[in-house]
């Protein structure tokens, strides 16, 4: 009987975990101009999780006094990574389309650097906490079997996990690869 109760308790706990939800799917078409590539991505996330359990807490958390870095990051993106900057413009348009125009390029220019910045000591000067993630990659001896990749996500806030997309990247009508990540922003 105790075993049955333990199994039921574990199953109920597992069913309530956010990590067991399937990530929304999105196709990133590289044939489109960069300013249009992410059209619909923000709406896909909001449809799946709502604003208050996805982007809302993420942007509230990320507004932690890093304003001193924003002009530098924006200048670097515009000059060194103009295509990525243009892609962020489509994400900014998506934020406005779901009713949050306050999340604009000023906020979005931080995200291409967020992951790297959050792992350095200097990030703590702006209210962040250094952290790291753990991952594992399993390559079976039989090449017919799939490769398995797993990792945790130590980023805060927890709702940040809900901006993960399962993306198919295409060009010329062909699938190039698949991405399962939240760093598409």
Image (tube, grey):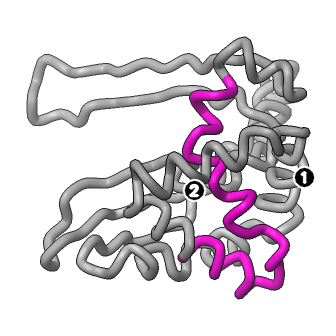
User: Residue 111 at what x, y percent from top left?
Assistant: 63, 48
Q: Residue furthest top?
A: 121
Q: Residue furthest left?
A: 143
In the rendered image, the vertical position of residue 56 relative to residue 31, given as above or below: above
User: Residue 144 at what x, y percent from top left?
Assistant: 10, 35
Relative side of 178 to 144, left or right: right
Per the rendered image, the range of residues in magenta is 90-118
Question: Based on the displayed image, in which of its 4 quarters is residue 105 positioned?
Answer: bottom right
Relative side of 167 to 92, left or right: left
**Residue under label 2:** 185
**Residue under label 1:** 60
Q: Secondary structure at mark 2?
A: loop
Give residue 74's mark: none
Q: Secondary structure at mark 1?
A: helix
Q: Residue at x 24, y 78 (%)?
A: 31
* Front-most of residues 22 and 166: 166
User: Residue 101 at what x, y percent from top left?
Assistant: 80, 79
Question: Based on the displayed image, in which of its 4 quarters is residue 138 positioned?
Answer: top left
> How packed is label 2: few (under 14 Cα within 10 Å), some, or many (20 or more)?
many
Which one is earlier in the sequence, the residue at label 1 or at label 2? 1
Relative side of 63 to 36, left or right: right
Q: Main secondary structure of the magenta part?
A: helix
Q: Residue at x 82, y 54 (%)?
A: 59
Q: For the residues marked 1 and 2, what is the alpha-carbon distance in whole angstroms?
A: 15 Å
Question: Based on the displayed image, in which of its 4 quarters is residue 88 positioned?
Answer: bottom right
* Front-most of residues 96 and 6: 96
User: Residue 75 at what x, y percent from top left?
Assistant: 56, 51
In the rendered image, the vertical position of residue 58 relative to residue 150, given as above or below: below
> How many marks overall?
2
In the rendered image, the vertical position of residue 141 relative to residue 66, given as above or below: above
* Front-most of residues 89 and 27: 89
* Front-most of residues 15 and 31: 31
């Amino acid at each position: 009987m105790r075993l049955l109760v333990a199994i039921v308790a574990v199953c109920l706990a597992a069913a309530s975990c956010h990590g067991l939800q399937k990530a929304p799917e999105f196709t990133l078409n590289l044939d489109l101009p960069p300013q249009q590539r992410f059209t619909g991505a923000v709406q896909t996330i909001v449809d799946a999780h709502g604003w208050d359990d996805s982007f809302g807490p993420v942007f509230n958390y990320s507004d932690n006094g890093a304003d001193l870095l924003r002009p530098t990051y924006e200048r670097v993106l515009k000059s060194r990574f103009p295509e990525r900057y243009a892609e962020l413009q489509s994400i900014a348009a998506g934020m406005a389309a779901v009713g949050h125009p306050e999340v604009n390029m000023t906020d979005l220019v931080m995200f291409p650097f967020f992951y790297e910045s959050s792992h350095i000591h200097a990030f703590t000067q702006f209210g962040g906490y250094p952290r790291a993630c753990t991952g594992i990659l399993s390559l079976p001896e039989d090449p017919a079997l799939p490769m398995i990749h797993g990792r945790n996500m130590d980023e805060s806030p927890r709702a940040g996990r809900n901006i993960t997309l399962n993306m198919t990247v295409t060009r010329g009508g062909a699938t190039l690869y698949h991405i399962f990540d939240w760093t598409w922003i």
